[in-house]
Amino acid sequence: MTSLVDGRAASAARPCRRVRRRLQGRVAAAAVLLAGLALTCGGGLLLTAGTAAPAAAVSVGSVPPAAPDVPTGSGPSATATPSPMPSPPTAIRIPALGLRAAVVPVLAPGGALDVPADPQVIGWWSAGPRPGSAAGTVVLAGHVDTAEHGLGAFAALARAEPGTRIEVVTRPATVRYVVVARVRYPKSTLPLDVLASYGRPRLALLTCGGAFDERTRHYADNIVVVGLPEA
């Protein structure tokens, strides 16, 4: 993810390089291997290297575990009524952040999540659940910036707060989520549970963040925004 912010990118619009992980979970009683990811992003600056706060200082809210529990009170619910016809997402909107972007399905060899080269287009991990599915985490990922195009649509995720509403557009319906957490994880410690294709229905939005390494041209961390279906 190169950026026009510093103008020192080694190459224009070099896309994020992906690092594939394996997730192990359960669908019904069967154990399955699920392809996961950590975004390894090259290029420019979203946060100035050496000034990024520790992960705990930039975490808000609490990421709910994949295994559902009994919801209490009001707010986003793990048992919100699923869409009658879960379909691939075509767009995402976060009105409070001024974010509107097209969404396209992406799937690299071996089941890994790829990221569209255009930072204004978001990738949906098509091996995972569709918006409105009764279980599992819908994973959307995008560049924070590139050298050729500057800031990406998901640069706005750094401002997402609990309670922010997210609209994921599909052809038959718009599926709504409410942000419950924004967390910055070092790439080497991205919890596998965050991307689980089993358990409670959730939404995970991923991009790069944290300190930028001038030598490797990569950000150190992943920013993950987690939402639950709007009740």
Image: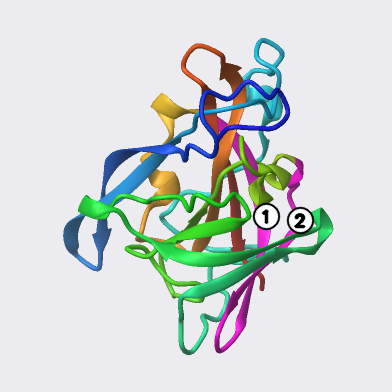
Q: Is residue 96 left or right of residue 5?
A: right
Q: Is residue 142 left or right of residue 181?
A: left
Pointer 1 or 2: first along the chain = 2
Stretch in magenta: 159-185
Whether residue 213 is in magenta: the answer is: no
Which residue was labeled with disc 2?
Answer: 163
Q: Position of residue 21 (x, y in %)?
A: 29, 40
In the image, residue 5 sits, relative to residue 162, either above or below, namely above
Instruction: Give residue 96's mark.
Output: none
Quadrant containing the C terminus is bottom right
Which residue was labeled with disc 1?
Answer: 179
- Pick the residue in front: 21 or 18: 18
Residue 29 in view, yes or no: yes
Q: Position of residue 47 (x, y in %)?
A: 70, 24
Whether pointer 1 and pointer 2 mark residues with C-beta atoms closer than 8 Å, the reply is yes
Q: Is residue 152 left or right of residue 125?
A: right
Quadrant containing the N terminus is top right
Q: Residues within 10 Å of mark 2 (few under 14, many from 20)?
A: some
Q: Amino acid at mark 2?
A: Gly
In the image, residue 75 sits, relative to residue 7, either above or below, namely below
Whether residue 164 is in magenta: the answer is: yes
- Pick the residue in front: 169 or 80: 169
In the image, residue 24 sits, relative to residue 31, either above or below, namely above
Q: Secondary structure at mark 2?
A: loop
Q: Position of residue 216 (x, y in %)?
A: 46, 17
Question: Residue at coordinates 73% horizontally, 28% vertically from top-left?
Answer: 5
